[in-house]
Amino acid sequence: TPFIKPSLCFSIKTPTSSKTSQPIITASPENADITFDSGCVANPVILPPSPHNNQKWQCFYYGNSGSWANGIPCFLPTGSSGLAESTDGLTGWTKIAGPCAEGACLTPGSSGSWDAVQTGVGDVIRVGDELHMYYFGGSEEALPMGPGGSIVGFRMRIGRAKSYDNG
């Protein structure tokens, strides 16, 4: 069955304000406490403050330090996921060191798991007092690429991780 286009279109009014003059989050310096993202950062997912759990804006994002798990060369900005917080959601974003390797809050799984090579946050939602992160991961399975070549980390699947401490 083909996709049916709706008969109505949505229109987005041109914003009256301008974009920020500087990025809100950048790659960490290699000598920082948080280094999982020293190569790049990407894909921000922003949550507004919660009156029950957290009075700050939260930005979940992914990045890497120039390679994926076990030194596998990376071709995407994915790798591990982190958290930054801001009081106004616009400026002053501060990275929060997570409990995982290199300060991340979500890292690839152990060898042999479906997400052993790289992960990336797709979305984060609040469910009561929990945060549910829907993320994708790449396995160690080698996929054919080009004549006689292969690549790992590109067999992607979707998973969910829960946080019981608000991130």
Image: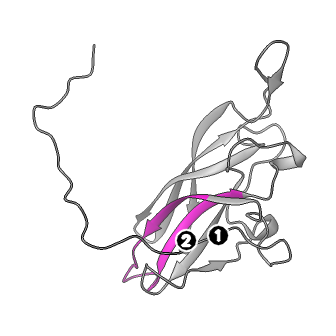
Say which residue appears at 68% left-offset and 30% top-offset. Answer: 155
Instruction: Quadrant for the N terminus, please.
Output: top left
Point out residue 118 in the picture as x, y percentages from the top left corner: 73, 46
Whether residue 67 appears in magenta in the rendering, the answer is: no
Point out residue 146 in the picture as x, y percentages from the top left corner: 77, 17
- The quadrant in which residue 152 appears is top right
The amino acid sitting under disc 2 is Pro
* SS of the residue under disc 1: loop
Checking the image for residue 26, the label placed there is: 1
The amino acid sitting under disc 1 is Thr
Checking the image for residue 23, the label placed there is: 2
Checking the image for residue 116, the label placed there is: none
- The quadrant in which residue 47 appears is bottom left
Point out residue 159 in the picture as x, y percentages from the top left corner: 58, 44
**Label 2: few (<14), some or many (≥20) within 10 Å?**
few
Vertical order, 144 against 140 (above or below):
above
Q: Residue furthest right?
A: 71
Q: Is there CB contact under 8 Å for labels 2 and 1?
A: yes
Q: Disc 2 and disc 1: Cα gap in Å?
A: 7 Å
Point out residue 164 in the picture as x, y percentages from the top left corner: 56, 70
In this image, 73 relative to 129: left or right?
right
Vertical order, 63 against 166 (above or below):
above
* SS of the residue under disc 2: loop
Whether residue 50 appears in magenta in the rendering, the answer is: yes
Q: What is the magenta range? A: 42-63
- The quadrant in which residue 29 appears is bottom right
Q: How is the image coloured?
A: one colour
Say which residue appears at 36% left-offset and 83% top-offset. Answer: 51
Along the viewing direction, whichever of 134 and 18 lies nearer the viewer: 18
